[in-house]
Image (tube, rainbow, N blue to C red):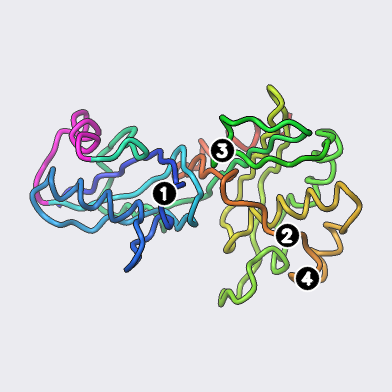
Amino acid sequence: MAVYALTLAYRGTEYSGWQVQKNAPSVQAVLQDAVEKVFGKRLDVTGCSRTDSGVHALGYVCHIESEKPFDTSRLPLALNAHLPRDISVLKAAEAGSGFHARYSALAKEYVYYIRSGSIRSPFDRDLCFFYPFPLDVKELSALGKEFVGRQDFGAFMSAGSKIKDTFRTVFYFDVCESGGVIRITVGADGFLYNMVRIMVGTLLKAARGGCDIKAALESRDRKDAGPTAPACGLYLNRVFYDRDQLEKRISEFKV
């Protein structure tokens, strides 16, 4: 039985998220259809995580298991021939028998894009959050450092979530700007439901003096954090399975 790890990019605008839904289109269901056409059999497609409706991916990882061998150099092209233009398999690799897209992951990295100012761009639609107020990147960067470290992120999880262990380790929280677009990069050993979007919403609220990030972390109360930022600005950027690659990435943000 061969295990194939697939790396995907997709525009999540038209989908209800990654996971199969009964009455809404999902990325997983569309990919399963393509896999069935290529392998001639309905195979399970297991993802590294759920992404919400409207959230995008630049480096999403999933895996399939098949008794039928397939040349991994040809597999992306074969699958892409059956996929819509808003989903693409970037690469495929044969993984070890113990590989699991979700449970083998050491960390994930998300990026969030914000265009701030009074003028919106029509090319940002569904791909970037338009924030009609000026933002200071240095201030955001300084505020964002409060998120780094192993902490209880109970205040940064959507109300109603049943997860009890809300401790997570955030390795880096970086803010930079290019071409009028602010990019927030967050790497952690795990994320709670809507955690990144709530972190972004809290950061923006804190920048306007509306809340205190440290106080929200200490209280663990969702009401002390900011609003949930829109899904359109969020991208799953990278999944780490190799310890050395993760450590190298962390070191890049410590310079």
Residue 6 higher or lower than 21, as above or below: above
Q: CA distance from mark 2 to mark 1?
A: 23 Å
* Marks 2 & 1, CB-CB < 8 Å contact: no
Q: Residue at x 68, y 30 (%)?
A: 181
Q: Amino acid at mark 4?
A: Lys
Cβ–Cβ under 8 Å for marks 4 and 2: no
Q: Residue under circle 1?
A: 14
Circle 2 or circle 1, nearest the eye: 1
Q: CA distance from mark 3 to mark 2?
A: 20 Å
192 in relation to 105, above or below: below
The CA distance from mark 4 to mark 2 is 9 Å
Residue 85 in the figure: left or right of residue 40: right
Q: Which residue is mark 3?
A: 125
Please give the residue where the numbered disc 4 appears in the rendered image. 223
The residue under the point 58% across, 74% down is: 161
Query: Residue 149, percent across and down?
Result: 73, 53
